[in-house]
Amino acid sequence: MFVYFALAIGSFLIIYYFLLKDDRDCKEPPGPKPWPLLGNLPDLFMASDNMTLALGNLAEKYGEIYSLKMGSKKTVVLTSKEAMQTILSNEATFARDFSGMWVDRSFRKNLGIAFSEGEVWETLRPWTFKTLKDFGFGKSSEMERFIKVASQRLFGSIDDKMGSPKTSCDLDVQLLYNDPILSIMWQMIVGRLSPEDEPSIKILSEKGDAFLRTSVFGAGIVNAFPFLRRIFPNALGYNVQMDFFKECNTIAQGHDNIEDEINGNEVAGQNNEQRVTILSDFKVTNPLGQRRRLHAAAPPDARSILGAAAANKSYFLFLQHCGATPRRHAAGKSSKIDAADAADKYIGVDLCNGPRVTILTFHLQNLFTEMEEKMRKLRMITPINLLEAFVQNSIKDSKIFNCDNFLLTFQDMLLTSTDTSNTFMEIVILYLITYPDVQEKVYEEILKVSPDGRDLSYSDRIKMPYIQAFFLETHRKGQPLQNLVPRRALSDIEYKDYIIKKDTIIMSDTRLYYENKEDWIDPEVFRPERFLDKAGQVVNAGKIISFSFGKRNCPGELQANIVAFLGITSLLQRYKLSVPKGQQMPRLDMRPGLTLKPYPFQATFAKRQ
């Protein structure tokens, strides 16, 4: 019976498809006629079973800009540099496709810096990167210090794997740089390099890699038909994606040891006790702190805002700062803080030797007022990391600078910087061992600039055109960000003879551009020299478009370039890389996913004399 039913439905859809009229406006870009209900998903499957090839294959038939329907969503695909640069630089494309997993991970709110829009994006994104720049990120001298510490940790780990008698070892390159890059991100956010052996770092690295390896088709189907993520969460990769976001939130929420975070960053002339109090209060007065689990001893009737605050050690830090001494259990009883006991017994406290008031009244009516007053008095404390600056700004604009926005900003920074940077480093090492002559030229240039083996600085890159050309060619051939983050049209957009309608989703595929023989001579060949002129100077760097265009481009371009330059030059100063003996050459085609990554491979790391 089921077979007959399926055949009947299939026959109906096919007949309906041929009878259906294309409802596209004559000025909209051309494209395949959509199927009933499914849109053009069948056309993508028929174009290629590899989503990274499907969009480009359709472009060969329909041109540099063409239309699709992803379910019921109107979509336009851009495949030429001219189309991408012109359209993505238009302010009418500065919105995101807010659907599917992106909705769920942000609590169905307009949050963060990557997928927000409007006031939140216009305020939070520039503030975040200006603040990071103030702390040294984007300033090469400060970045160099962080990268060198993280690199030395990595080299120590590689040397340990060799053992004392040996001078080489074979290592899996996958995720090799994830921990060092994640440590640098940790420095940006909380003001310290994360310890390599911290379990959460390892877990986050693994889950971030799994997230990026999830099916592009699955993500596309979830965006086209959001309800399917509830029916087939595993098959569509939805569970893996949400697992990564949950891990990010768990880590961001888990700063109960904020005292250690702050005390590990002593700054002359600043009161760290006051800094601890400010951050702890932030956890109590915002939704993040209020949602924390109550102590196991707390009965249900005590689970109020007051009970949650009493069970949270940051509440006691707040009271102690005000001069109060909350009563605890009598000797011989459990030392655990009981929320019901807090609600019943902690009725009056001597607030800075002033009149007695109830905690309930004080907490519900005056906590925010007191917090504002303290922040005004303590403005002389200069924030030393993004978390502290976020807390300080919450007193000025709690609508934007709240805990939910911090969680999503934390996610966005990890997702857009850590995993993509690690992927690029994997591709760099892949090409270095595949083309040993290229590696030798890079190393010779390093020796020329640093014959005594001194650590290179980012400023040295201007004297090293070949390695710059090597990185540009790696972007072109490796294409880790082949599909730029989709946009959404805020209004009708004109491009040549076409009109992109309001609310159309705009996708960009760079593969056809990077492999186009009209734009590149011998595009199938890996040849860094294509970015050098006859005098050996860098040319055509602007032809690389991995970081997109317009105000919604990737703001981490400078950071990514500094990490790649210092990371690879210091690596090659210490080790010679090669394909392990007895192993075949690694695959050069990339593994499909939300970003393109190399298939797993090993490299031999041999110490240089």
Image (cartoon, grey):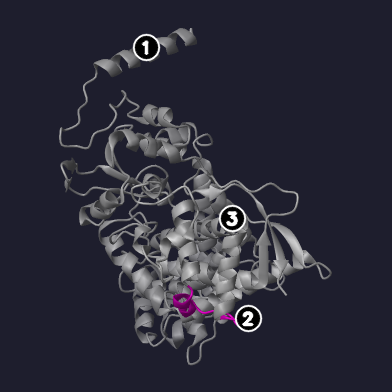
Q: Identify the residue under disc 3.
A: 430
Q: Earlier in the sequence, mark 2 or mark 1?
A: 1
In percent of the image, x 48 and y 10: which residue is there?
3
In percent of the image, x 64 and y 65: which residue is there?
198
Q: Amino acid at mark 2?
A: Gly
Q: CA distance from mark 2 to mark 3?
A: 24 Å
Magenta: main secondary structure equals loop
* Residue toward you, 443 or 536: 536
Name the spot of residue 342 as percent of width and height, x first.
53, 67
How busy is the neighbourhood of tag 2: few (under 14 within 10 Å), some, or many (20 plus)? Answer: few
Q: Amino acid at mark 3?
A: Leu
Q: CA distance from mark 2 to mark 1?
A: 71 Å
Q: Identify the residue under disc 2.
A: 453
Marker disc for residue 11? 1
Q: Amino acid at mark 1?
A: Ser
Q: Earlier in the sequence, mark 2 or mark 3?
A: 3
In percent of the image, x 50 and y 57: which residue is there?
249
Q: Quadrant of the C terminus?
A: bottom right
Query: Can residue 319 be spotted in the picture?
Result: no
Q: CA distance from mark 3 to mark 1?
A: 48 Å
Closer to the eye: label 3 or 1 = 3
Which residue of the protein is positioned furthest toward the right in this rendering? 165
Q: Secondary structure at mark 1?
A: helix
Q: Secondary structure at mark 3?
A: helix
